[in-house]
Amino acid sequence: MKPLSETALSIKASTTLAVDSLAKSMKAGGLDVIGFGAGEPDFDTPDNIKAAGIEAIKTGKTKYTPAAGITELRVAIAERLKADLGLGYDYTQIVVAGGAKHNVFIALTALLNPGDEVILLAPYWVTYKEATIMAGGVPVIISAGEEANFKIRPEQIEEFITDKTKAIIINNPSNPTGMVYSRNDLKEIADICKKHDLYVVSDEIYYGLVYDGREFVSFPTLSEDAKERSVLINGVSKSYSMTGWRVGYSASNSQIAEVMSNYLSHSTGAPGTMCQWAAIEAVNGPQDSVEAMRKIFEVRRNYITERINKIPGVSCLIPEGAFYIMMNIKGLTGKSLGGQYINNDDDFAVAFLKKAMVAVVPCSGFGAPGFVRWTYAASMENIRSGLDRLESFLKGE
Ligand code: PMP
Ligand code: GLU
């Protein structure tokens, strides 16, 4: 048979979802695995949101909707962006898709011609690279190490701009680093984008999760120009514990929104109608659960980082937002752990899972070899046990 698409064959499965599925299937098989793989809040979807979904089903809201989502949801999202960030978007500029992941993909599809370069700031969320390739683009990776707090200096970006550069993806707060870009850094990035006429995909899905009273700055709020050239990505998965409902959204200029909507109309159409009605309740309803979750995550962040930094052989920076930490395991390479020689983060993750039954994500897939990612969107009990297991594992117990 003729070979499949070269692009499709080059795409690797998402490491975050792969680790998560493996941990879940091991657990289903009766093994005592603790999962720190996929970043999804361990809290249940709030009752008022579930009730809205159930009510939607009962009242027959079970039919097709416009490809970019029902007007009521798009209006509710525009109002939430206004209330939370002061951003003014018309509802027609909001596009609802099957998760923020899908919005990222559709945004890139709308922006890129074959061969267009997209700047990624490493460590980056694993999907950005593959989604860029799937959309016909070429990822150009700029890295910032631990010594730079995993934050790219804006001036680094200019060195990588060519006449093919079309867009840059910013994830603030970042998955996997948890770092938050300052207003000044973002302003400098916005200036560079204006100077070189670049689009910005600004993934702000963790915008409600910032710690230590730090300021969160939404990219399109920086200036009219920044707003015009950016596609803001967000969704209900993280803020409202709705990962399985698959509702994400973007806000952009009208032309991009229309093109994205056209693409959706020929691919997935809109997400499940009842999920959209539940999402209206999420963005319109009481917002106290968002802040309650943020506070709990902050306590967990403090606990996990304090303990990791006391364990010989590993260390981590203290993240400023989101719910991930990157644990440096470079001191463990060349050792044997759990019967496995550790060459890299992949080996560590495999050995840790097999021997200690703890699932973490190797960061090579995020463009940051030598680290593994833990999510602290896990119960305190699991975090405690996971770290106890780490201590025993490193002691060779
Ligand atoms: N952006 C980032 C940075 C993420 O970590 C994730 C993972 N949940 C998403 C987007 C996608 O979220 P969802 O598709 O569940 O809305
Ligand atoms: N985005 C989350 C993560 O990075 C969930 C998994 C996924 O969608 O890739 O773990």
Image (cartoon, rainbow, N blue to C red):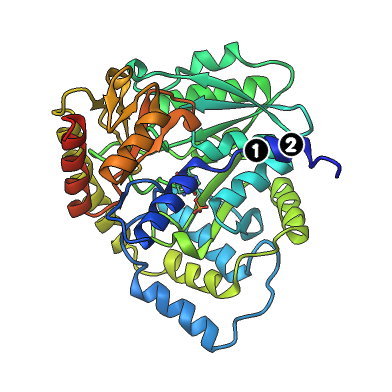
In the picture as drawn, the residue positioned furthest to the top comes out as: 159
What x and y, as percent, mark residue 116?
74, 27
| Amino acid type of the residue that numbered disc 1 sits on in the rendered structure | Ile
Residue drawn at point x = 57 percent, y = 37 percent = 128
Mark 2 Cβ inside 8 Å of ligand 2: no
Q: As shown in the figure, which amino acid type bears the numbered disc 2?
A: Thr
Q: Which mark is residue 58?
A: none
Residue pictured at 36% horizontal, 17% vertical: 148
For label 1, the crowd category at 10 Å Cα-Cα, with few meaning under 14, some 14 to 19 and many 20 or more, is few
Q: Quadrant of the C terminus?
A: top left
The label on residue 11 is 1
User: Residue 362 sits in which quadrant?
Assistant: top left
Res 210 visible = no
Q: Position of residue 394 (x, y in %)?
A: 20, 30
Which residue of the protein is positioned furthest toward the bottom in this rendering? 59
Residue drawn at point x = 45 percent, y = 53 percent: 21
Indicate the position of residue 279 as horizontal and vertical percent values.
Answer: 49, 67
Q: Secondary structure at mark 2?
A: helix
Q: Residue furthest right?
A: 2
Tally the marks: 2
Residue at x 39% of width, y 18% of height: 145
Q: Nearer the viewer, residue 365 or 240?
A: 365
Contact flag, marks 2 and 1 (Cβ < 8 Å): yes
- Secondary structure under tag 1 reads loop
Disc 2 packing (10 Å; few <14; some 14–19; many ≥20) = few
List the residue tagged with mark 2: 7
In this rendering, is residue 312 above or below 91? above
Q: Is residue 27 above or below residue 204?
A: below
Occupied quadrant, residue 90: bottom right
Left or right of residue 220: residue 196: right
- Residue closest to the far front: 339
